[in-house]
């Protein structure tokens, strides 16, 4: 009985840990889609955030400064996507994939040039679990929440703030109007390009935080291609959650659960088969679970 209880606690705690990068990346995708820009560049933004957060922490000796460092470069990568699609009207799928390919090629090169290493970086200062006594004293939840680091709580806060911004503020209403009908938004005097750029910039910021969680939250170093397709999964979660921050939170935890199950089945089934589980589930969701997840009507549309 104790073993089973420990296993349940372990799975729940692991589910929440696995969901954090997905929560943050899909939240970024939500802002991008709600500004009328496709979010296929999330994988590259996450990967860039993972690398530059480690670089910033290595230079400064502070995980928080590393996080800020990564946010800046994550937003720069998102601006590359924005300029190509919004200003030069390149198809968003192509510009997003360009960002992904650039990050995939650039991070190993920079890893070799800066750290003089291949495959992974040196270890750096990372985020630690908060030592909050009051948290550990909460029955049941204390044991689960006490196993999370500070970025988990930041992710939950950002989801709430993101929902409030999109659905309870005038700016959020206007941005959603841009994503549904950019021509009508332009007609009533809204700065359509400005809202689109803002949405993509926020997408880069949140996706970077998701990448930083992988390198400075779960680990204390950068590993080549460490995002392992999570940015693409976040795109699916965003549609699964109907482009709503609360929906993406639920979807991320759902996907995180299947990621966490790896720890249960890795001793029973071949490791390669177990590692496929989150991706197989993603394919099932794409095939059977996205019938109601229609994108905003104005995504990909431009104004003259």
Image (tube, rainbow, N blue to C red):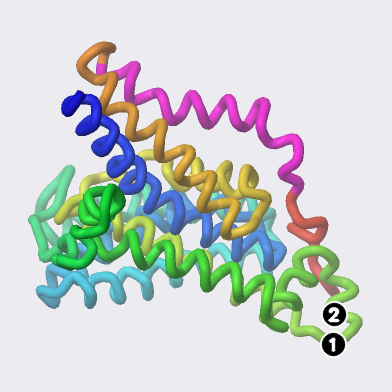
**In the image, is 157 to the left or to the right of 186?**
left
125 sits left or right of 262 in the view: left
Q: Position of residue 138 (x, y in %)?
A: 26, 58
Q: Are marks 2 and 1 in contact (CB under 8 Å)?
A: yes
**Residue at image x 26%, y 38%?**
9
Residue shown at 66%/26% (left/top)?
287
* Residue 160: assigned label: none
Image location (x, y in percent) of residue 114: 15, 62
Write down the region rendered in magenta.
271-294
As drawn, 58 above or below 152:
below
Name the residue tied to disc 1. 189
Dot 2: element: helix
**Residue 145 x %, y %:** 28, 54
Name above or below for residue 95 compared with residue 176.
Answer: above
Q: Is residue 55 left or right of residue 202?
A: left
The residue sitting at 15% across, 46% down in the picture is: 118
Residue found at the far top of this picture: 269
Q: Which residue appears at 29% of the width and 32% of the height?
A: 8
Frontmost residue, 145 versus 44:
145
The reply to whether residue 237 is visible in this rendering is: yes
Circle 1 — which element?
loop
- The extreme bottom residue here reads 189
Instruction: State the CA–CA distance, disc 2 to disc 1.
Output: 5 Å
In the image, residue 111 lies in the stretch drawn in magenta: no
Q: On screen, 281 above or below 145?
A: above
Magenta span dominant secondary structure: helix
Quadrant in which the N terminus is drawn: top left
Disc on res. 186: 2
Q: Position of residue 230 (x, y in %)?
A: 42, 43
Quick one: 268 or 86, which is closer to the camera? 268
């Amino acid at each position: 009985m104790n073993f089973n209880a420990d296993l349940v606690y372990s799975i729940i705690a692991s589910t929440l840990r696995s969901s954090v990068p997905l929560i943050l990346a899909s939240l970024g995708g939500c802002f991008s889609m709600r500004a009328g820009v496709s979010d296929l560049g999330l994988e590259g933004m996450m990967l860039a955030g993972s690398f530059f957060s480690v670089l910033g922490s290595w230079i400064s000796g502070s995980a928080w400064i590393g996080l800020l460092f990564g946010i800046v470069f994550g937003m720069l990568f998102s601006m590359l996507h924005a300029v190509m699609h919004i200003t030069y009207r390149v198809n968003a799928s192509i510009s997003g994939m360009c960002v992904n390919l650039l990050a995939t090629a650039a991070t190993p090169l920079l890893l070799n040039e800066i750290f003089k290493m291949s495959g992974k970086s040196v270890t750096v200062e990372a985020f630690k679990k908060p030592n909050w006594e009051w948290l550990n004293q909460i029955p049941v939840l204390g044991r689960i929440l006490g196993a999370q680091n500070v970025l988990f709580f930041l992710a939950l806060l950002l989801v709430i703030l993101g929902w409030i911004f999109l659905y309870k503020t005038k700016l959020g209403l206007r941005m959603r109007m841009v994503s549904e009908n950019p021509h009508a938004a332009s007609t009533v005097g809204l700065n359509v390009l400005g809202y689109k750029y803002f949405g993509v910039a926020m997408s880069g910021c949140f996706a970077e935080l998701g990448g930083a969680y992988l390198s400075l939250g779960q680990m204390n170093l950068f590993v080549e291609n460490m995002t392992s397709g999570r940015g693409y999964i976040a795109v699916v979660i965003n549609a699964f959650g109907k482009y709503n921050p609360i929906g993406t939170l639920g979807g991320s935890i759902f996907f995180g659960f299947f990621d966490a199950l790896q720890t249960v089945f890795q001793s029973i089934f071949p490791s390669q088969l177990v590692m496929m589980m989150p991706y197989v589930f993603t394919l099932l969701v794409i095939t059977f679970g996205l019938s109601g997840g229609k994108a905003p009507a104005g995504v990909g549309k431009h104004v003259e």
